[in-house]
Amino acid sequence: MIPGLTAYIDSELEGYASVTLAPPYPHPCLSFSQPARSSISLRRSPRVALLFVVLRGRSRPEDVSWRVLVNGVKVSRVFKPQHVANLGEFYYTYVADVTPVLSSSTYADVYVGCHAYETYVEAVGIVGVYPEDFRSRVRVYAGISRVNPASSTDLGEGGFHVVWLVGSGRGEVLVGPERAEVSQVFELGYLTQSSRLNVRGSLSIYLVATSSLSGRPPELVLEARRVEGGRVRLAVANVGSYTVRDAELRVQRGGSTVQRATLGDVKPGQVVEVDLELPPASNASAKLTYEFCGINFVRLVPLTT
């Protein structure tokens, strides 16, 4: 994995890992009585939950006093960041297992208070391992890794990978054919069949979480099979090996939703057909959205009268 990051999870587990970052950042960390507060909504109650906090400032770690609470629970009697780097300013990364606090919760209220000189909370997030009806190889790495000018990482074995990346700086991230330009604090999520993660530019990487799965990734194919009598028959087929969640169809005209149909879960090999009214306009389209392993997908098909 990326040099400078430490493994916190490396196991085959039921489900997948997903990252939720609390925007926006950075926040000033003023005092214990004026903490930086973050509210994070989780997808559902996680089986395993890790809190990560990234701070930057001018004080050495031994000269700073911190306090971190999650849902009112102090996560450590003495807050000592496991990772420190001097990058012109000091950067500190702290990781804590908060599974007992979040195992029956769908939100995390995080308070970070400190006594220090010009200290800012750079990023706060939760890595959750969410239960599913499949197993994956879950790897979670955290710390502070300085990338300049480039770094390439092997994602390991698997038919495909779900990759999450948290960092800051300016540059680009490449995962297979996907390319994203980043700046400031960023959070990226990908589903890829590529085995390489490449980062370029002047970047600091704080966290990488991957879930490696076998088989074919889920994919919903959207077709407009028949258009007649002012109605359109939309067919949605799952041609992958896994169930997708929260599938929804919309017929749109000029960006506005005219009709909506909730499909819910779509299983491998399943075909769902929905008849909807076709608006009398040449710029109508069908929009399909769905979710898998915390990644949201969108498919668009133009419709003609």
Image (spheres, rainbow, N blue to C red):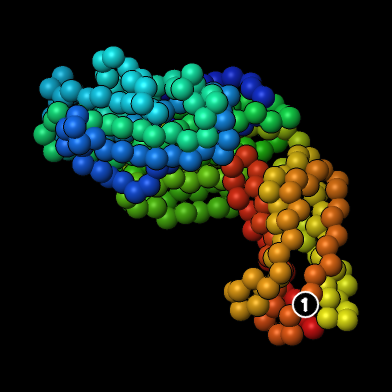
Q: Quadrant of the C terminus?
A: bottom right
Q: Is residue 62 visible?
A: yes
> Mark 1 is on which residue type?
Leu
Image x and y of residue 262, in percent: 73, 56
Quarter-of-image position of residue 69? top left
Q: Residue at x 55, y 26 (%)?
A: 104
Image x and y of residue 125, in percent: 41, 36
Q: Residue at x 11, y 34 (%)?
A: 117
Name the outermost residue toward the top: 77
Please give left or right for residue 30 compared with residue 278 in the image.
left
Note whether 209 is above or below 226 in the view shown: above
Q: Residue at x 58, y 35 (%)?
A: 44
Image x and y of residue 298, in percent: 64, 58
Viewer-nearest residue: 251 or 184: 251
Q: Is residue 87 visible?
A: no
Viewer-nearest residue: 268 or 114: 114
Q: Residue at x 48, y 40 (%)?
A: 41
Image x and y of residue 237, in percent: 82, 54
Quarter-of-image position of residue 60? top left
For the residue labelled by badge 1, is the local secondary structure a helix, a strand or a loop? loop
Note whether 250 is above or below 95 in the view shown: below
Name the residue carrying label 1.
Answer: 278
Note whether 291 is above or below 36 in the view shown: below
Labels in figure, total: 1
Please give left or right for residue 300 compared with residue 119 in the image.
right
Q: Dot 1, how many residues are within 10 Å of its Cα: few (below 14), some (14-19), or many (20+)?
A: many
